[in-house]
Structure formats: C-alpha cells, structure tokens
Image (cartoon, coloured by chain):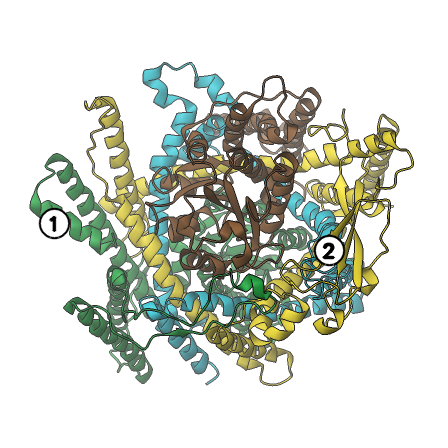
Chain colours: A cyan, B brown, C yellow, D green
Amino acid sequence: MKRIIPMWIAIIGGFAMMLSSFVPLAESAGEMFADVFNVVAAIAFVLGAGSLAKQHLEKLSRRDAGWGYSIITLGSFLITLFIGLLKIGIHPNPSFPQAAYSGSNDAEGSAWSWIYEYMITPLTSTMFALLAFFVASAAFRAFRAKNTEAILLLVTAFIVLLGRTFAGVVLTGWFPDWASGLRLENLSIYVMQVFNTAGNRAIMIGIALGVAATGLRILFGIDRSWLGGGDA
Amino acid sequence: MSGGNVNSTNASARPWFERLDRVDRRWIFLLMFLAVSGPILWIGVTGKTLPEAPTLAARAVFQEINQLPARSLVLISFDYDPASAGELQPMATSLVRQCAAKNLRMVFIALWPLGSQVAQQTIQDVIRDDYPALKEGDDFVNMGYQAGNEAVMKLLLTDFAKAFPKDSRGEATSNIPILKDVKMVSQFPLLISVSAGYPGSKEWVQYVISAYNEKMNFVTGCTGVSAPQLYPYFPQQIAGLLGAIKGAAEYESMVNESLAVDGVATAPKYLQAQRRMGPQLVAHLLMVGLIIVGNVIFFARKRRGAA
Amino acid sequence: MTRQAKTWLIIGAVFVALIVVRGMIGQGLGRVYVKRTDVTVTLPDAAAAGAPSASANESINVSPSAASTQVTGAPSSGTTSATSASTISWQEWKQVPPLEFIAAQKANPAQTEIALSWPRTIGLWLAAFFTLAIFSFLYADNPFYKIAESLVVGVSAAYWGVIGFWDTLVPKMFGALTPGLVKSLVQPSLVAPERLQQISMVFALILGVMMLWRLLPRGGWISAWPLAFIVGVTAGLKIVSHVESDLMAQAAATMKPLVVSVTDASGATNMWDSWWASVANVLLVTGVICCLTYFFFSVEHKGVVGGAARVGIWYLMITFGASFGFTVMGRIALLAARVEFLFDDWLWLIDPNHFRGL
Amino acid sequence: MRITHKIPRRIVTNQSCKRVAAFVFMLMCYAGAFAFETRGDGSVPIAPTARIVVAQNTSTPPQESATSTPVAVSATPARPLFNSEKTALLLWIVFIGAAVTVSVWLAKSGRPIRIRRIAALEAVDNAVGRATEMGRSILFVPGIQDMDNIQTVAGLTMLGRVAKTAAEYDATIEVPTCRSLVMEAARDTVRASYLSAGRADGFSADRITYITDDQFGYVAHVVGSMVREKPATCFYMGCFFAESLIFAETGNAIGAIQIAGTAESSQLPFFVAACDYTLIGEEFFAASAYLSGEPAQLGTLRGQDVGKFAVGVLIVLGALASTILIVTPNSAPVVWFFDILQKVLGG
C-alpha cells in the first residue's frame, strides 16, 4: 500500500495535468501548480536546514577532522537566517510606513545587503570564474586529433575561438569580398547557423521524445524506481 | 587539487613531449591568470581599447531600438544575476542608455530573483546619473521580480497587472502612469531581454514572441553559453542578438558612436565591454596556443609510437 | 610545522608585505566612502495601523547638517494630514566614489556628510580575501579555501531560505490565506486573493505539512505522497510542453526547401547566394536526420544506419565544438570581472571608471 | 546488447488493466471532445467562471480608486471544452503514447528486443565495482534543479539503479543535493534500492545531504569534498549549468571515472570533453530503462524510436514537398500535402 497510493497519485496528477493543457478552462493549471510547487519547496526548506544542521552538529559532537569549519557553517547559517527572516535593520518602505515589515531586505546599507555584496557575490562569482581556468586545462587535454570526431570538435572550437576576437579580423579580414564567407567571423556564424542548428534541433527532438517516454513510463507505472527499488 | 601528475622522478629520462604532456595543470592556470590580468592592467593604465567591427546581429539590435518613435514603450527584462554581470552588465547599460537617449518609455521587469537589484543598479548608473530628467513612474518604472518563470510570461500575455501587481517601490500597478493603458505584453512594440539562462530569451521566444510575432519585436543579449541555442531563432523570432562580451562590445561601440559629442570623451562606464575585449583576445590566443601544443604533443608521441 | 604549512605561511607573509607596501604608495587602497541622507516619514496613524513598532530601534535622530528628504506618508494614503504627529526617521548611506570624498573635503574639511564607511571597508577587504581564498583552490585545497567554502555554504543556504520565505511564502501562501496580516505588516498594496488561489494554497500547505511529517517519529511515509504528486504532475506537464515546443516546433522548422533561389534588389537571381543558401538547407536537413539516426536505440549502428549515425555524431561534435568556443568567451569575462575587482576596487592599481581621478 | 527475455504469456495483471483503462478513458474523452469540435458549432457553453475580484487594494485612497481600472466581477466568455488549436499536439501525444504502449505490450508478450550498446551504461557496473575495489566512495550528483524538472526525476531513476548496484557491490554512495525536496526524494530512492538489494542495513540517510540552494555554494562544497575524499567514481545525472565543467575537471584531477548524463545541450560539450562517458540528451532519458533490463522498460525505448522515425519521415517529406513548391509553386496537390504536413506539426 505504501507504494501503490503514491503511484496512483502520480498517475492521476499527471494525466489530469496533461488533460488540462488541452482544456481552455483549465489552462492555468500549470501556473497554479508552479505556485503550489514553489510553496511546497519553500516549506521543505525546513527539511534541508534540518539536514544541514544535523550534519554539522554531528561533526561537532564527534570532533571529526575539520569540525572547526562546521562551526563556521552553522554560525553563518544561523546569523544570516536571523538577519534575513527578521529583516534586522530594515526600515519600512517610505510609501507604507505603517507596515513594519514593508521594507525590502535589499535596501542599500542594510546588514542583508552587506552579506549579499561582501560575502555571497565575491564567493559565488569567484567560484564561477574558476571556469576560465578549467576551460583552458580541458582544452589542452581533450582537444587532440585522435579521430575524426575529435578533429571536428577541435577545429570548430578553433574557428569560433579565433572568429570571436579581433584576431579573426586581423587574420582573415584581408580576404577579398567574393571570399568574405571564409572570413573567420563569418565562418563561425555559418557554423552556428547550419551545423549547430542541425545538431541542436536533433538533440531537442530526441530530448522531447525522451521526456515523453520517461513521463509515460512514470504515468503508466512501468518505471517505479523513483519510488524506490525498480523491480519490486 | 594538484594536477595529479606531479611526480618528477626520472622526469629527465622522458622525451620532451611526454614531459610537456604531463605538465602540472597549475602552470596552465597560471598562464590563464596572466593572460587575463596582464591586459586588464595594461588597458587600465593606458586607457586604450581595441576597435570593433559590428556584426549583423549586433547592428540589428541597434537598428531595432533606433527606429522606434520617441515615447514608445519598451519592456526590458533583466533575466540574470550578479554572477553573470561581467558579461551582461555592459549590454544592459548600453541598452538602457540607447533607450533613454531615444526618449523611450522603459518598463523594467525581472524573472530572476536577483534581477531586480541589477535593474535598480542599472537605472541608478544610467538614468539617474545621466538622464536625470526622466521621472520614475512617467518615463520608466522598475516592476521588480516575480517568481514563476514561464508562468509569469504566460500571464503577461493576458494580464500585465496580474503578473506584476506592484512596482519595486510598492506602488500598485494601476497607479503607475506609464502602465495606465497597458493591459498585456503585446502593447509593447519592443521586448528586450538580457538573459543568462533559464528563464530567459529562449522562453521569451517560446511563450511570448511566437504568440505575437507580428506585433512585437524582440532583441536580446545573452551569455556566450546560451548564444548557440539562440542563433537558430535569429533573425526570424529574435530580431537582434548580442552574443557574449563580443556582442556587447560591438553594440557598445555603436551606441557610443551614435551618442558621441565632439570633444567630450565617452564616460568610462560606457566602455566596459570594449575594455574587456582586451583580456578576451589574449586569453583566446592562449587557448588556441594550448590546443596547438596539445596536438603537437599528440602527433610527436604518435610518431614515436609508430617508429 | 609541516612543509606545506610553511609554504602557505611564506606565501601569506609575502602577500601581506606587498599589500602593506601598496598601502604606502599614492592614495593607498581599499577604502569605501558613503554619503548620508536623512529620511523622515510621518506615520499616518500609528495606532490605527496596528503595526508593532519594530522600527523603533532603527530610528535615528535627524541630523540637521545633511540633506533631509521629507516623505510625508504614503502617496496612496491620502489621509496623512495632521491626525498624528508621530514620525520615524532614519539615515540612508549611499556609496560614493572616493573622488567625491576628496572634493567634499577640499570644499569643507569639517564636513561629515561623506565619510569613510568602516563596515563597507571591512566588507571590501573580506570580499578580496574570499576572492583570493577561492582562487587558492586552484593551487591546492587549503584552510583558506575551507573557510570560504564553509561560509558560502552556511550563508547561501540561509540566504535562499530567507528568499523563499519573504518572496514565496509570504506573498503567495500567507498573502492568500491571511491577507489581512500580510497587508498590515508587509505589503499594504496586496491585491486580495482569488478563491481559486486560496484553494490552491490550502492544498500547497497540506502538501507541505505532509512533507514535514518526516520530522515526526511516526508516519514519515506520508511524505512520499506530495513527492509522488510533484513527480506525476511534472511528468504530465513536461510531456506536453516538450512535445509541443521541442518536437513539433523543431521538426516544422526543419521542413526547408532543398533548393533556394535568392533574388537581389533588382529581382535577378543571385546564383552564388542561391547556391550557398541551398547548400546550407541541404546540410541542415541531412544533419537533423543523421543526428536523429544516431539516437536510435533499437537498431544496431551498422550499414546505412551506421553510416548515417556516424555523420550524425560528426554533426554533434561540430555542435559541441562551437558551443565550447562560444562559452570560453563568457568564462573569461567572468574571470576578468574578478580580476578587475581585485585591481580596481581593492588594490586601486587601475581606475578605469575614474572613481579616484587618476 | 541483445535481450531475449522469454516471458510466458501470462495473464495481464489486474493492475495494468486499470492503467490501460485509464488511458483508454482519456482517449475516449478526447475523441468525444474532438468530434464535438469538428462538428462545427464550436464552443460549448459552460457556466461562466465568475472571477471574484474584490476591490483591489484597501489601502488605496478613495480619490485614487476612481482612476484605477474598475474591477468588477468579470464574467469570462464561454470557452470551449477543447482547445482545437492543439489538436495536432494531442494527436502527437496519443501517437507516442500508443507507440510506447504497443511496444511495451509486444515486449511483454515475449518478442525479443534488440537494443544497441550504450557504452556509458555498459561502464556503470565496472565503475561501481572499481569504487569497491579501491575502497573509496561513489559520488552521485543529481543535477542542481528541483523536483519540478524532469531531468532531476530522470536523474533520480538513474540513482535508483546505481544505488542498487552499489548496494550489491557493497560500495558507499554519497549524494549531495542542491534542493531539500531532491534530498528527500533521493533518500527514498536509495533506501528502497538498498532494500530491494537485500541490504537494508547498509543504508545510511546521512550520506544523502542537503548542501545549499545556491548554485556555486553547492559547487564549492562538492568540489571541496571531492578533493578531500577522492571518490573513485563520479556520476553527474540531471540538469546542469555552468558547474558541469568545474565538477568534471575536478573529478578528472582526482583520477575518478566519470559518467555524465544531461539534456542541457549547452553543457554537453564540457561533459564530452572532460568525462569518460557522456549520455547525450535522449540517451540520458533512456538510461534508467536500459539499465533495468526489463522488457517493459526496454519496450518504451522502441516506442521512442517509432516516434523518431515518424519525425524523420515527416521532415524528409516536408523538405521534398517544399522543394517541389519552389520549383512549381502552383501544384495544387503539393500545396495541399505541404499544408497537411504543417498542420500535423502544429503550424
């Protein structure tokens, strides 16, 4: 029973949703579900927060290697939560001074925006910036002319890399007009519009079918591994 | 995380290409850092930028905005957050600047939670600093962020005020002069999205533009990573496309040229993208060099293996 | 002390020394200046609004020296007038370029309107530290990175939790279920919820409570129900949207003529352009068909199918190469932005925005 | 791979009867609605949906409310039961559904199904075994999106398979997640996998953790722990964005075997360049079915192929028809045929 009921919930919910997209009256069902989902996800944050706290409290109580870092995580988590949920130091919106919590956490100079500007932004955007290093090391290692596939991969990347900077203009800009199609910047656009479009279209069509089949496997109750234990 | 190949015992016994192949990848990281920071320092000190030759897609963006009559409504969606600001902020700045200079009425929205803040910052930097005559509510308004991704777009098709019930100041939509007659999104002749991913340009095309292809024009600026997915839509659904910092630099140079006043140097904040093309060039050349070296190693080894 | 620790200590010491030296040259480095604005707001009727005066501890006395913005009530609450004299006021601090501070000091050395902001200066240095700490991971895992990692996890987890609360739960759920409360405390401009919206939010609340049931010692299995609902509905929704926008739309867009004639302005057929356009279309259609063939599961890739699948894989590789090349540009831009932050905002080595008037 | 399960033609179970019934019921509903539509009189009058809109904003002062849009109880015009613009879409879904159902039925009735080898999936067992041999863990990243993304769901079905293999090989599997709901779902999935492998005692919920909703906060933690714990095998299965290459390059540096799968086409190049095996787009959605080896599931793959074949044929016909139209623009049968093709694709 513990698995049959959820399965039927999924089946009924799924088919109802499929139907709703064809019935003008129920067209907004998808949007309503988005709202419902966002709310459920926001409520479920309690579970995530619980898991986070539990991991680090256990590390602390066991004095595992690096438990000091758990103090940092827990402390920063609780302080940020406290400041944000209570809107510490946020004055009300001048348009609605009577509503105590009408101000936005993002007001300049607030503790919240300090956290955002001096902690979240540098930490996350530097993490993002690490990619510049990784594209270089990946290109060095992986772009080698081992076979036809690899040659196509690396030559295309090469054309686009050069075509997207001033170097492309310098290298091939002198090509006469009748051969302007072979200028690197034009070549890279041509590659985008023909080969890239073809590849992406096929991938998209494949994905659509894959999504449909995956969805139908769930809705027909064939694939129950998401409920756990495929064959059971 | 070391390169994993730091063992240097009997390294001298190996041929040169083996050693080069097993080079600690941290040397590559260092080269990349120098390739980016060197030009930044150089351009920062000398103030010189590289010339740009605008491509078709970037020229189209400029043209779409330029052809609108004054006081036209423009919907500008900030679908990115500070993490992508390095690439997209120069586009947003130049787009807002061209709209402000053309005296278009701008409505800012955000489908990314942090997009509203970025929009506010752009308004501050461009409109309040350089076009102080424009009044919030009459000439532009920031409607803030709405959760719901495509759902918001679909709602915009039928009911603007329901999708964005209040602006970022908390004013109800019905009280905002600029939006007084706006019922739905098709009343905007031009939609601009500065987009870093989902939801963004692709969803705008799928849910809004394909519904109103005749009435609405759509131009977009996007990150390098999403540009390949958008090229198939250009120029049918997407009238103009700025791809990555290169597109930003091309467009920026066009806007600067059109608004240039003799004898007055362009404010440095309007040269962001062109400044950033310097490190791009050197870093791209480094990447090209790395790929060449990688293949030289590969072929040298192959020949040795065959011999 | 291990060798590694020594290396890190030496690197750190050299770094600090360099920064100290930098601090002694020219204008120094890494300071943030702010300009004060005083805001005074008159409460229309504090008692009637019924809002707890949580703002009391924030109100700071108006300083007469600074420019004072007088905001009288809300523009929408027409009845501000003289019913009540209670006001709240606070100060707002806006960041300004150091140049403005220098100019203000020159004009009046005793001015207090623009001043050095200690919190933000410390923040700037912290941000620089975090930037370097994350970069240090490229060399090897180390305590600085671990500190940065622990902090970013803790802070960002809470950050998104708070966003979820104020941007989703409050306006959507509480706004639908307890509109009065939300109106009086948070968002007076709240549009009254529709009945359907209220029903869906009650439903959401029930699902949420079922999820949280897991925290109780018994009956945790009930949380499988909301998950099943979400999975099922997602499946149903995505089947429809993907078939519509990906399968049908993309296939329709690919039904292109294999022979195209391009005419130029004079109406004559341009042979060269026609030829290119035709080749492009042929390549496009074959490409899509071959790539689709590659994805076939129930046919072995042999013979004609194998050949087509191989061409398909070539197309995919070209697609991937192009995407890779395009993406590099964005990634380098991100790194450039961080380096600019270090050189410009923190070290004051370059001044592209003319904030310090170099 | 050639799978020839000889399944006795056993009586179709009561349960699948119900499922088929549900599906048939849906079809009948639509057939009815569709027939009604095409009969011509269009819209079915339905009780107007009264949209209850209360006066907009109590804090709006009286003088302003006069100028604001008057919101009365607006009765939406009667709407039809079926959106006839979406007929083609419905037909496609029914077609794919039928293709899948028939293929499943054929597979269940014992017809052999051939499925081509997918190298990435053949490698799963070895990759898991390697972790056991080396005494290290397996890292499974189910993407960074929430449960309302079908890729996350597909990633979790894959997790179910991998976790079962891991349980059989007695390898530990770590699943850091980026969303609370995904954590809960992953715990359910892995618990059930251990249970069905007969190793319920080996399951530990603490290995499936929530880190943070923030993309790069999550990345910072995952790569940090990768470098410290050096998993022998890394799976990246789900919806990925920029973090794909950070994971893949870090995994490469620690010498892990990496198997990735995503439908996010912008990230495929990075996985292809830096991972040992990559499931591209549709292959990723097929992974769970492939690994299950069950005839019913493999049958759905055949159903997908039927869909692909149909699309391919339509594209070829469409391209030919539009080419003929270029040459002879006024050929009535071709115009008619092309029109039909476009209608089929929702044009």
Q: Quadrant of the C terminus of chain C?
A: top right
**Image spot of residue D236 (x, y percent):** 52, 55
Residue C266 image point, x, y percent? 21, 21
The percent position of residue B16, horizontal first and vertical second, equals 60, 25
Asked whether the residues under marks 1 and 2 belong to the same chain, the reply is: no
Q: Please, is residue D317 above or below residue B10 in the view?
A: below
Chain to which the residue tagged by mark 1 belongs: D
Within 10 Å of disc 2 (Cα), the crowding (few <14, some 14-19, many 20+) is many
> Which residue is depicted at the point 43% across and 47% down?
B188
Residue appearing at x 73%, y 55% in the figure: A112
Amino acid carrying mark 1 in the image: Trp
- Residue C146 visible in image: no
Q: What residue type is labelled 2?
A: Trp
In the figure, C324 relative to D176: above or below? above
Q: In this view, does C222 lie to the left or right of A55?
A: left
Query: Which mark is drawn over residue D336?
Result: 1
* Residue at image coords 86%, 26%: C25
Q: Residue A112 carries which label?
A: 2
* Spatial CA span between label 1 and label 2: 63 Å
When asked about the image quadrant of residue A88, the answer is bottom right
Would residue C28 appear left or right of A229 to someone viewing this image?
Answer: right
